[in-house]
């Protein structure tokens, strides 16, 4: 089959299934091949019943010690039996599978595989898979793909469809020269794609991941190079006048704080770029809380008073609103026209902004990708800034640049990338790093605790609120379902509200809420009308409420360390002492060690490198990091060797096309 062939032409996919695939973003054969599993199912050696704990997903080797019982419950027909090994017994339960009655007989041995639960003091496995010793031996050596799913589609359906295009994958040509493959021991392209879906074993999977990471990096670097060729030598059509800035009554002097060394260096770099012969293309890299926003505002201001328009693009509406309000306040004395542009505004509101941008009335626009919609047209766009850019792909960055006639570009990122790698990944840009934190900051105090500590944590929150501060609570994460996640947040916040008492105002925030509701909640939180905000990770990017002093994170063990660091960065933004409480629900040794890193360090670089070092075997995809620059597989830390190799290859062969 051709790669661009519609998935409807794949054997076994009809109109209805095709629609379900479309919802996952799979339209043609290529999309399907690139739809990688999020994990693999592997089986492990059986353990003794006595060693199993609630929540463990394990295999037990047991003898059936009772007759099979089938009875009708209220909602299901329940089939169950007791099984035991020499150390203890465990009840196996299946719903709506009465035919199993004739499958099992007292005295036979099986391997049961499933999740252990406690019912009273009895161990139970619901819906276990079962194997004979022989079939289990076979299962032990396989790895089956588990795909990310959305309602409607089954894992089986994806597995079957990928199998159906196997011949197409096998026939994919290799685009890399043979000696590159040989010298670097790379897995050939089509083998790697097959292994991604159906790995033979962990070793081949690792090699496949490396190869796919290499391809992703190479494709990215080729694009970056084109971008660089297009922009770097562009003439600067928007030379700025920065005289007003340094004056005694200028903007910087009027700030309630003095800039850190890193901030002033960044401002200096920007000024020199924007007044030079060539257009600016600069990355500002600084850890969360280092004060990147004010640097952006200074750039926007200089650009505006020099007579050009500026745009600030951020990844979420909530953040757009917050930046908009802060910036309006900061720039009030300058009588500039600042506008907000987001997807949830009415068409009429948007049209007004479009009109003002076109006529040059609007000096500064702040918004989400609504800014890069086709209908936005600027009169004289001189500066484009993207905040937390890892959320935007290169494409969006490009599109925003195309809006004007080669405006200055400034990108702000909190992703802690070592300089050597940053130079490769941002080959098209100059880089300024803000290394230092504002000096008024007190070090965040961290503690990693178990669930039994919850009452203390709640008490602590109550005390902080009594002192006039506020708190965030990040709710347990639920995989793959926004709906369940929303429900979770609501329940948690109800319970918390009950526990904290009536005088403490609790509210919740999650991704499924309407934009207006989100905005409203955030407003009220920032205006101190809400004391405790229970939220999913939607607050992770950029929200700033310096009065919040407690960040409590449930199920901390389920997040990547870099993401926890971003979350923690929501507190410690003001003068007051702040606290981060990480609740470690599954107190395994590994999770303890990982979280300990956060307890010991507030340094984003160190945390990112430790995260990598501590990843366990079998943790092929890591825990999805937030700053992943939109690569599907490639991870700049884990695959840094591939990034360097891709860089070398792209320099040596300049006509490669990644397929
Ligand atoms: P980030 O780099 O994470 O985007 P922000 O720009 O949101 O950080 O800044 C975080 C907080 O620090 C804001 O409340 C901001 O007003 C404050 N801030 C920024 N620079 C300084 C400084 N030099 N001294 C004191 N506070 C500062
Ligand atoms: Mg920020």
Image (cartoon, grey):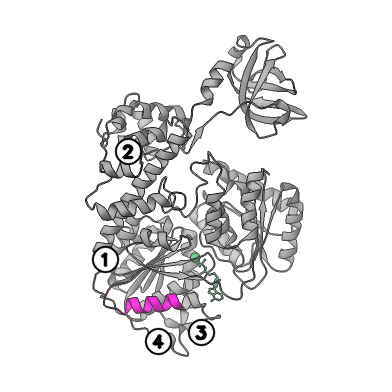
Q: Earlier in the sequence, mark 1 or mark 2?
A: 2
Residue beneath disc 2: 189
What is the CA distance from the residue labelled 4 to the residue labelled 2? 57 Å
Relative vertical location of residue 595 with respect to residue 114 in this rendering, above or below:
below
What is the CA distance from the residue labelled 3 to the residue labelled 2? 58 Å
- Looking at the rendered image, the quarter that the N terminus falls into is top left
Residue beneath disc 3: 254
Q: Nearer the viewer, mark 4 or mark 2?
A: 2
Relative vertical location of residue 323 with respect to residue 101 in this rendering, above or below:
below
What secondary structure is found at the residue carrying circle 2?
A: helix
State left or right for residue 649 relative to residue 499: left
Q: Nearer the viewer, residue 306 or 40?
A: 40
Residue beneath disc 1: 231
Q: Is residue 106 visible?
A: yes
What is the CA distance from the residue labelled 3 to the residue labelled 4? 12 Å
Q: Is residue 452 magenta?
A: no
State left or right for residue 516 relative to residue 648: right
Label 2 near label 4: C-beta < 8 Å? no
Residue 244 tag number: 4
Q: Residue visible at 42% across and 41% down?
A: 209
- Looking at the rendered image, the quarter that the C terminus falls into is top left
What is the CA distance from the residue labelled 1 to the residue labelled 2? 32 Å
Label 2 near label 1: C-beta < 8 Å? no
User: Which secondary structure dominates the residues rendered in magenta?
Assistant: helix
- The range drawn in magenta is 265-279
Q: Is mark 2 within 8 Å of ligand 2?
A: no
Q: Nearer the viewer, residue 523 or 281?
A: 281
Q: Earlier in the sequence, mark 4 or mark 1?
A: 1
């Amino acid at each position: 089959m051709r790669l661009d062939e519609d998935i409807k032409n794949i054997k076994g996919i009809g109109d209805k299934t095709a629609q379900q695939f479309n919802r996952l973003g799979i339209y043609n054969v290529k999309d399907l091949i690139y739809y990688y599993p999020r994990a693999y199912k592997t089986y492990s050696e059986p353990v003794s019943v006595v060693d199993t704990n609630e929540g463990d997903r394990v295999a037990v080797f047991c003898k059936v010690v009772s007759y099979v019982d089938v009875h009708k419950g209220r909602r299901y027909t329940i089939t169950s039996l007791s099984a035991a090994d020499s150390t203890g017994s465990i009840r196996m339960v299946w719903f709506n599978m009465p035919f199993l009655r004739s499958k099992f007989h007292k005295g036979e041995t099986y391997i049961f595989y499933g999740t252990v639960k406690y019912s009273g003091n009895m161990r139970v496995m619901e819906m276990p898979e079962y194997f004979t010793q022989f079939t289990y031996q076979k299962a032990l050596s396989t790895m089956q793909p588990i795909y990310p799913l959305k309602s409607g589609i089954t894992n089986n359906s994806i597995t079957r469809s990928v199998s159906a295009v196997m011949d197409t994958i096998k026939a994919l040509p290799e685009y890399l020269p043979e000696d590159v493959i040989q010298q670097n021991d790379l897995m050939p392209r089509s083998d790697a794609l097959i292994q991604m879906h159906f790995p033979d074993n962990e070793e081949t999977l690792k090699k496949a991941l490396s190869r796919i990471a290499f391809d992703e990096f190479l494709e990215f670097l080729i694009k970056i190079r084109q971008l660089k060729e297009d922009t770097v030598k562009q003439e600067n059509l928007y030379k700025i006048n920065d005289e007003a800035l340094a004056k005694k009554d200028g903007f910087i002097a009027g700030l309630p704080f003095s800039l850190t060394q890193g901030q002033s260096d960044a401002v200096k770099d920007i000024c020199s770029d924007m007044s030079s012969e060539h257009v600016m293309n600069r990355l500002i890299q600084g850890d969360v809380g280092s004060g990147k926003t004010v640097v952006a505002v200074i750039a926007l201001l200089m650009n505006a008073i020099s007579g050009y328009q500026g745009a600030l693009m951020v990844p979420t509406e909530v953040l757009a609103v917050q930046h908009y309000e802060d910036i309006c306040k900061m720039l009030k004395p300058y009588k500039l026209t600042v506008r907000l542009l987001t997807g949830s505004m009415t068409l009429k509101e948007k049209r007004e902004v479009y009109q003002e941008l076109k006529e040059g009335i609007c000096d500064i626009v702040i918004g989400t990708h609504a800014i890069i919609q086709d209908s936005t047209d600027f009169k004289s766009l001189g500066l484009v800034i993207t905040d937390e850019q890892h959320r935007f792909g290169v494409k969006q960055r490009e599109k925003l640049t195309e809006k004007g006639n080669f405006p200055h570009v400034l990108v702000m990122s909190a992703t802690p990338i070592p300089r050597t790698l940053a130079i490769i990944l941002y080959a098209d840009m100059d880089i300024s790093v803000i290394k230092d934190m504002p000096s008024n900051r007190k070090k965040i105090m961290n503690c990693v605790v178990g669930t039994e500590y919850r009452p203390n944590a709640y008490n602590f929150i109550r005390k902080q609120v009594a002192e006039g501060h506020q708190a965030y609570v990040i709710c347990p994460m639920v995989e793959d379902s926004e709906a369940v996640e929303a429900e979770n947040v609501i329940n948690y916040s109800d319970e918390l509200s009950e526990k904290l008492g009536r005088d403490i105002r609790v509210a919740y925030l999650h991704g499924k809420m309407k934009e207006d509701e989100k905005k409203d909640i955030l407003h009220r939180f920032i205006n101190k009308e809400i004391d405790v905000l229970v939220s999913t990770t939607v607050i992770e990017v950029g929200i700033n409420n310096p009065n919040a002093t407690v960040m409590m994170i449930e199920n901390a063990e389920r997040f990547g360390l870099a993401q926890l660091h971003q979350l923690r960065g929501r507190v410690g933004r003001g003068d007051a002492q702040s606290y981060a409480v990480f609740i470690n629900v599954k107190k395994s040794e590994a999770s303890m060690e990982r979280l300990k890193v956060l307890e010991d360090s507030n340094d984003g670089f160190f945390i990112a490198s430790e995260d990598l070092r501590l990843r366990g075997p079998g943790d092929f995809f890591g825990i999805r990091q937030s700053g992943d620059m939109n690569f599907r597989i490639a991870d700049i830390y884990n695959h840094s060797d591939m990034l360097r190799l891709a860089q070398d290859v792209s320099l040596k062969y300049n006509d490669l096309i990644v397929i």
